[in-house]
Amino acid sequence: MNQPKIVSPAEWLAARRQLLDKEKELTRRQDELAAERQALPWVRLDKTYQFDGPSGQQSLGDLFSGRSQLIVYHFMLGPGWKEGCPSCSLLTDHLDGARVHLAARDVALTLVSRAPYTEIARFRERMGWGLPWVSSHGSDFNRDFHVSFSKDEVAAGSFYYNYADSAFPSEEAPGISVFARDASGAIFHTYSTYARGAEPLVGAYYLLDMVPKGRDEKELPWPMAWVRHHDRYGVTAT
């Protein structure tokens, strides 16, 4: 890290106020984008999806837990994987505490992965997470929402991800999908985002953005190469 210029308190305050103007403008733009996101048209889902969870088979409607809005995080854990994606795990570490607040605003939150539920349950217990997590194994859910790909697609290096022909070095990819349910029980797809679109859920990144070294990833082979499962860092938070 290069040593920044050392200035007087008055000079620092002037620079901070200039940055504050930019931060406020970004906040206003984020509010505008949120309004545009909420105003997107909806697509009715006529296809039936089944998931496997701790109490057996569940429909997509069941995942709403009696609420009218549902957020699904597409967690990268494929069949036969020994453990879940470290980056998805970093994100999920931030979600447990949010569940009760979301529930108070008529929102259910769940993770969905393609691994069989027994494999999900084993990793979920290791991580100590309490939020719902179900398996889409055997259904088209992951493919229909463009977060799972065949071995041939991965080998070819081209498939549809993040709304364009893309390449991803895995059969599983991350994403968020949002659904709504009306009084008749009809379910609608309202929004999905992929890749860095899920980054706002990673509060640790936004805290790192406040410190002088920032994310400190420039010398790494890829941006999240430093990320580990929370039981693999070998450090304590004290």
Image (tube, rainbow, N blue to C red):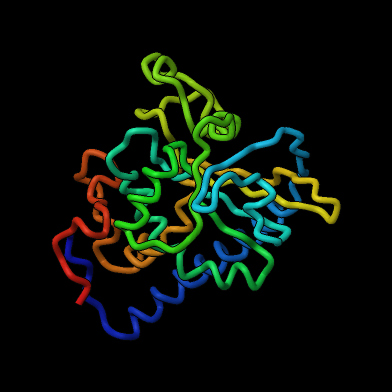
Of residues 144 and 25, which is closer to you in this image?
144
Outermost residue on the left side: it is: 234
Q: Position of residue 21 (x, y in %)?
A: 52, 70
The answer to which image quadrant residue 235 occupies is: bottom left
Q: Position of residue 169 (x, y in %)?
A: 35, 28
Q: From what the image shows, is residue 74 above or below residue 54?
A: above
Q: Residue at x 80, y 50 (%)?
A: 185
Image quadrant holding the N terminus, namely: bottom left
The answer to which image quadrant residue 90 occupies is: bottom left
Of residues 82 and 106, which is closer to you in this image?
82
Outermost residue on the bottom side: it is: 9
Q: From what the image shows, is residue 23 above or below residue 196?
A: below
In the image, taking residue 188 as reference, residue 164 lies left or right, namely left
In the image, taking residue 195 as reference, residue 180 lies left or right, namely right
Q: Residue at x 61, y 60 (%)?
A: 108
Q: Position of residue 218 (x, y in %)?
A: 24, 47
Image quadrant holding the C terminus, namely: bottom left
Q: From what the image shows, is residue 184 above or below residue 128?
A: above
Outermost residue on the front side: it is: 56
How many discs appear?
Answer: 0
Q: Residue at x 29, y 56 (%)?
A: 126
Q: Residue at x 71, y 52 (%)?
A: 36
Of residues 169 and 33, which is closer to you in this image?
169
Of residues 208 and 65, which is closer to you in this image?
65
